Image (cartoon, rainbow, N blue to C red):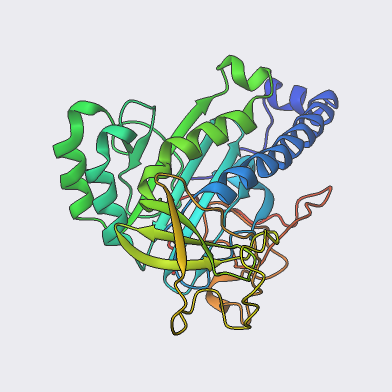
Amino acid sequence: MTMPLEFTNEETALMADQQFFRTKAQIMAKVRHMLSATHATLKEEVGSASLVTPPDFASASCQFVKGEHLELFPYQYLDFPKHFQDANTFTYRTLFWWGHHVVCALMLEGEGIKQHKARIVDRFHQLAGQGLELSLMPTLWEWKRGEGYTLPITHDRKAQIAAVLAERTFLKIVRFLPFTDPRIQSGQMPEFSRETFRAILPTAESSRSRIRWEVWKPGFPVERFERTEEQNSPTTVAISAGPRGKYFDQQQPCQESPNVRGKGNATRLMVGIACGHRGREELIQKPNPQPNPSRQPPKEYEENPGQNPCPRIQNKVGTHDPGNCTARSYHGHR
């Protein structure tokens, strides 16, 4: 089909309109600011959550991306936490898509996917009724909403959701915020993203309890210990000595470890258990020693939420778009 060379009245009016692009630039700057605030908000949530993550997961890893061509429309997004490594994906994305909506999504693939699916079924009624939807598309990189694209997670759909999950090798749970929602105008994108993260959390959070205890031996200060247990079996052990306490017996200043019992020397033990309290995980960023070339596009092309992003961290977004290539939201990521 041959494209006509003549311009319509509407097209020529848009070509002459300078104010549109000034307004667009201002809007995109505000969106970038809101994504930065979203990052700060989510750091608190991630730091206090007991996430079930793949190997080499770095909870501080993030990226900010800006582009122009997600099905012809501009976009910006934040990935945090972000993990794309080998066949494993564990990423929470907050996406602003011009002309469509804001969408938050937890994307899971690879190691642990069976356990993630089991948690959705086991904790279904914690997830249901909160505006969450399950993506039905055969790829992680589709961002449309509606019949055929997503399935609302409601209390009456447990059997249907379970049947869909049984056939999938990856998961994507999403929540949408239309531009007509008053929260957009009032700049509440960070709060929306945090609420969505909390709503999705049962999908990816372990059942953990924290056990604390104190041990002392005559002649030694009190030492405080802590252990995090998952599903009644110890998975990680974090031991830390508390502040120096009172010496209970100055007549036995032996140098043995206070949690080792010596001959004829009884050890006193006091145990306190606090269940249901999630341990905080350190926000330690581990560098990716060797990026996967299949996940890193050429530098002359912009990053694009329709493609699997490279595993580096992009903390700055330039004042102009990094390329003019056309991107697709329906794109394979391998």
**How many badges with numbers are in the image?**
0
Task: Looking at the picture, tell me which residue is in the foreground, 151 or 187.
Answer: 187
Q: Is residue 316 visible?
A: yes
Q: Is residue 69 left or right of residue 120?
A: right
Residue that appears at 23% across and 44% down? 122
Q: Which quadrant: the C terminus?
A: bottom left
Task: Looking at the picture, tell me which residue is in the foreground, 234 or 117.
Answer: 234
Q: Is residue 251 above or below residue 89?
A: below
Task: Looking at the picture, tell me which residue is in the foreground, 254 or 226.
Answer: 254
Residue 165 position, x and y percent, is 23, 50
Residue that appears at 64% across and 56% down? 62
Q: Is residue 333 visible?
A: no
Q: Quadrant of residue 316?
A: bottom right
Residue 328 position, x and y percent, is 51, 52
Q: Is residue 104 above or below residue 24?
A: below
Residue 198 position, x and y percent, is 47, 37
Residue that appears at 38% across and 27% down? 130
Q: Is residue 131 left or right of residue 221?
A: left
